[in-house]
Image (cartoon, grey):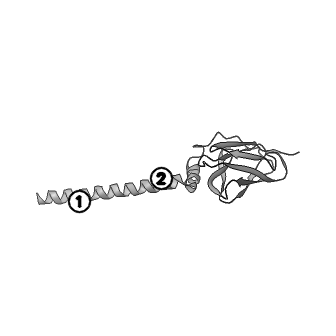
Amino acid sequence: MDRLLRLLAAGERVLVRLAAASLVLLVAGQALVAGAEGRWLWALLDPGEGWPDVLPASAGQAPLSLTLALEGAGAAPQVAVTVNGRPMAFFRRRTVTIRVHPGDRLAVDARCCSEPLAVRVVAADPPVIHPRPGARFPLRGGWTDLGLVAPSR
């Protein structure tokens, strides 16, 4: 009988430790996925999950450089600039510069923000027709499509 009680106590300790370890892993996993770094990791693990359908970029064309500025906040690391549905930059600072190709679809994912924000196209090198420098796109707490990149001829 004494042996059975010791065996049950050992089994109980194992189950309690397993439950505690599972709880710690669950909380750590949720914290990782909820933050901006977790969203980046999640996009690597499952590209396309939660992101709109992608359009293929124009192959063989020279890349363009676009500089975007966030208005209404100094920084918003949760706000993502997406190219063809994939996150390419986060507004960890007030401005971001991304490389795009003609025909790429630009969008901003501001689902995490409730305050009124806007994105302004500051510069493009070489010049583009769309989105043109100076264009302002208000963000309303969701997806904001900036359109297709169109270079000037």
> What amino acid type should be assigned to the residue bearing mark 2?
Gln
Point out residue 48 in the picture as x, y percentages from the top left corner. Answer: 60, 43
Residue 30 bears which disc, if any? 2
> Which type of secondary structure does the marked residue at label 2 adopt?
helix
Residue type marked 1: Ala
Query: Residue 105 falls in which quadrant of the image?
Result: top right
Q: Position of residue 146 (x, y in %)?
A: 73, 43
Q: Is residue 64 visible?
A: no
Q: Residue at x 46, y 57 (%)?
A: 28
Q: Which residue is mark 1?
A: 10
User: Residue pushed farthest right?
Assistant: 153
- The quarter of the rendered structure image containing the C terminus is top right
Q: Is residue 124 above or below residue 149?
A: below
* Residue under the image location 71 percent in, 57 percent down: 96
- Label 1 and label 2: CA atoms lie apart by 31 Å
**For the residue carrying disc 1, how many other residues have a C-alpha within 10 Å: few (<14), some (14-19), or many (20+)?**
few
Across and down, in percent, residue 24 comes to 40, 57
Please say if the residues under marks 1 and 2 sit with CB atoms less than 8 Å apart: no
What residue is at 72 percent from the left and 50 percent from the top? 119
Query: Where residue 141 sits in the image (x, y, percent)?
Result: 62, 45
The tag earlier along the polypeptide, 1 or 2, is 1
User: Marks 1 and 2: which is nearer the front?
Assistant: 2
The answer to whether one can see residue 24 in this image is yes
Seen in the image, is 21 located left or right of residue 49?
A: left
Secondary structure found at label 1: helix
Q: Residues within 10 Å of mark 2 (few under 14, many from 20)?
A: few
Q: Is residue 140 left or right of residue 123?
A: left
Looking at the rendered image, the quarter that the N terminus falls into is bottom left
Residue 66 is labelled as none
